[in-house]
Amino acid sequence: MSKIGTPSREQLVRKAAELAPLLRKHASWAEENRRLHDEVIDGLADAGVFKLRRPKRYGGYEADTRTLVEVTTELGRGDGSAAWVASVYAIPGWMACQFPDEVQDEVFATPDVRVCGTLSPSGMAAPADGGIVVDGKWRFTSGAHHSHWQEILAVLVPPAGEPYPVMALVPMSDLLVVDDWQTSGLRGTGSVSTVAKNLFVPQQRVLPLGAVLQGEPASQRSADSRIYRLPLLPVAAASSVGTALGLGRAALDTFLQRLGDRKITYTDYESQSAAPLTHLQVAEATLKLDAAEFHARRLATQVDSKGTEGAPWKIEERIRARADMGAVVKLVREAVDILAGASGGSSIYTDVPIQRIARDVQAISLHALMHPNTNTELYGRVLCGLDPNTQYI
């Protein structure tokens, strides 16, 4: 432990790695029940995962981005759904620290508080006395079953002027949970839909989305901390890549564990490990994972350095954050595709993890903010001198 009682990065990463047997044990249950097992949530809490982005004044760690990436990478080696939910909690948990101090006092009064949310403004809001009234539905709400609060986005229509997006923080008890998470990948994340009907939200729990995108917290105490004075999208990008990287490492782990016992059917190879083709496949997949790790580390280093320096972000730097995220996903998916394709017909059985890993990686690669093609095009657009065609930078 450090002098102030905060675990070091190495300690937190080791605790995450030690969770792998528990995560693997419950991975099939999570797939079948479409949510994380309660024992997994308890294990994540015991390992300090829910304190990573919690402010130190509330007993949290205020861990840097590199720590978050390394922790979620280790979680991803155990189970992609558990790692994904942990990373999602880290992002809205960080966003909760953008609200005024009295709101944070309320949110962080709960030990190991879990905040879920999405970045899609799929609700509508109207001004009301002392706050706003919201109606809407938010899909892909990962970890909703075990959350205490949700960050929701809505378009506020003022009496005069142009509508604009706002972010609001609401207790989960104020929302209707719709159990509609029937998917092919990341099934264990429980990413259900939530609904608000004529929901009143007090003004102190409402912020303009633009301020959050720019990294302008409404709390001076948050502004004094380097990890909270950052723009949202680079933080979200860096917070997301560990899950993909961990899944890639899990695919390689799984492939190598099965390698010694596998023949190549209808050939003279008594062991797949003797085939030159296998050597090429393993090497190519490993090099892709190494390259993905480079992009993940570069992204985390940039976010942490900018926070420490308090320096403004250039447009190119913001866009490269998304490009690095997209590159991680692209390279991991390519590596997993190679390993899954080399795993043979027996790998389609549900007790062989590679099939679940491949489906989870595919699901990640289809995420609107993580899609490699979208992010690569955006990067190229800016490199060619054009303005970005999105606010989400």
Image (cartoon, rainbow, N blue to C red):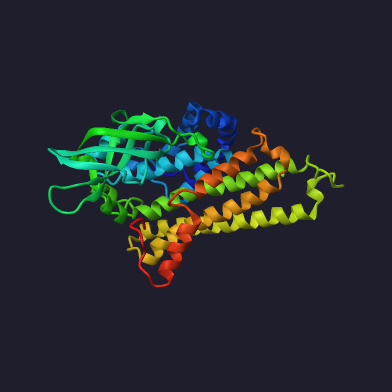
Which residue does the image show at 55% across and 46% down from the upper left? 361
Which residue does the image show at 67% across and 34% down from the upper left? 349
Above or below, comparing residue 288 to residue 166 in the picture: below
- Left or right relative to 120: residue 189: right
Residue 364 rendering spot, x and y as whole percentages: 50, 47
Q: Is residue 343 visible?
A: yes
Task: Give the residue at the far bottom of this rendering.
Answer: 385
Q: Image quadrant of residue 45?
A: top left
150 vs 44, nearest the viewer: 150
Residue 339 rendering spot, x and y as whole percentages: 67, 48
- Left or right relative to 97: residue 350: right
Task: Give the residue at the far right of this rendering.
Answer: 268
- Left or right relative to 201: residue 21: right
Residue 306 rendering spot, x and y as whole percentages: 38, 60
31 vs 99, nearest the viewer: 31
Q: Image quadrant of residue 191?
A: top left
Which residue does the image show at 81% across and 50% down from the upper left? 274
Above or below, comparing residue 317 to residue 102 in the picture: below
- Left or right relative to 351: residue 38: left
Q: Is residue 52 visible?
A: no
Residue 77 rendering spot, x and y as whole percentages: 58, 42
Which quarter shows the C terminus?
bottom left
363 vs 257, nearest the viewer: 363
Q: How many marks?
A: 0
